[in-house]
Amino acid sequence: MASTSHLLLIAFLLSALVAFSNAGNIAVYWGQNGNEGSLADTCNTGLYSYVMISFLTTFGNGQTPVLNLAGHCEPLSGTCTGLSDDIRQCQSQGIRVLLSIGGATGSYSLSSSDDASSVATYLWNTYLGGSSGSRPLGDAALDGIDFDIEQGASDHYGELAQSLINLAGGTKVYLSAAPQCPFPDQHLGPALQAVTFDYVWVQFYNNPSCDYSSGVSGVSGAWNTWTSSFQSSTIFLGVPASTDAAGSGYIPPGDLTSQVLPAINQASNYGGIMVWSRFYDVNSGFSAAVRNSV
């Protein structure tokens, strides 16, 4: 018969195994406030496993693409090429750095399959593993593309994602998406059905029907729908880093770690949390407060 100490040890090891198997990471958006610190500073905090450079706000439908980094540097004058050193520094720490396309404001749409293919070629040659005479972020190759599509029609984004995969050939290009928590997302729903995205950071904010305004049950109910619907993707809980970062959905760190995460982190495809954004995180210390529980 096993001794009490042996039973306690077995229980401890089992709980540790469960915790390890569901250990999560933190993803963050960087680039929309010049006062949030550099990309290298962001990675050097040790808080994040994924950083999305945001945003490519204009693309598609014959438009000249526009990268907006809100005060960090000016792509048109060539002052963003120095970010290559930061990107490589982040990558050397095992952090995946992606370019986020879209955003809440901007001018973007895809008018046809050919348009999707054209945008994919532009992204591949300008920011990923291809080559171009014009690379706004310098010669470093980003790890992938993040789809933060929040306006316009949902057409052709699945084709854009598939075209990126095809262009990469045997090279891995990571694809992520940031849908809203109401399911299915009106802008990204078809793309998520058409292509398997590596990471899906669902925005559980500015959506009172499923963010923390609806309580733990509202969050966990929507979470279960997302995780069960995309079992081949790693799903993240998107949260604002402070009350100033979103109109609704802020979860105090204590509530997140004691109530919300225990209700969701047993999902086999639980990935952790996504935080909007680095600027608000700097001021609130949100990620630092929750990192050991994610």
Image (spheres, rainbow, N blue to C red):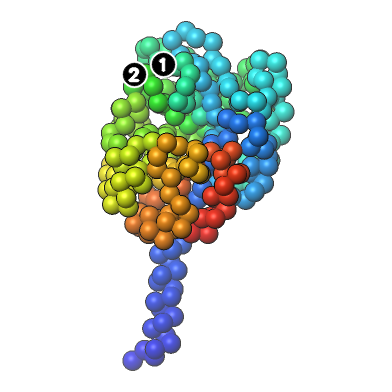
Query: Which residue is at a point 61% across and 44% down the rendered structure image?
Result: 282
Query: Which residue is at a point 45% across and 16% down the rendered structure image?
Result: 108
Q: Amino acid at mark 2?
A: Ala
Is residue 213 toward the left or the right of residue 240 in the image?
left
**Quarter holding residue 178:** top left
Residue beneath label 1, please? 109
**Quarter holding residue 50:** top right
Is residue 76 toward the left or the right of residue 96 in the image?
right
Residue 69, position as x, y percentages in the image? 60, 25
Q: Is residue 86 visible?
A: yes
Q: Amino acid at mark 1?
A: Ser
Neighbour tally class for label 2: few under 14, some 14-19, many 20 plus, Cα within 10 Å: some
Residue 113, position as x, y percentages in the image? 37, 14
Q: Secondary structure at mark 1?
A: loop
Residue 236, position as x, y percentages in the image? 42, 45
Looking at the picture, does residue 284 appear above or below residue 145?
A: below
Residue beneath label 2, please? 153
Is residue 185 toward the left or the right of residue 87 in the image?
left
Q: How many angstroms separate mark 2 from mark 1 (CA)?
A: 7 Å
Query: Which residue is at a point 48% across and 31% down the rendered structure image?
Result: 146
Residue 118, position as x, y percentages in the image? 47, 14
**Quarter holding residue 97:** top right
The quarter of the image holding the N terminus is: bottom left
Q: Which callout, 2 or 1, points at the residue further toward the start of the chain?
A: 1
Q: Secondary structure at mark 2?
A: loop
Closer to us: 237 or 144 = 237
Looking at the picture, does residue 146 appear above or below residue 199?
A: above
Does the residue at mark 2 contact the one at mark 1 (Cβ under 8 Å)?
yes
Query: Which residue is at a point 37% across and 49% down the rendered structure image?
Result: 269
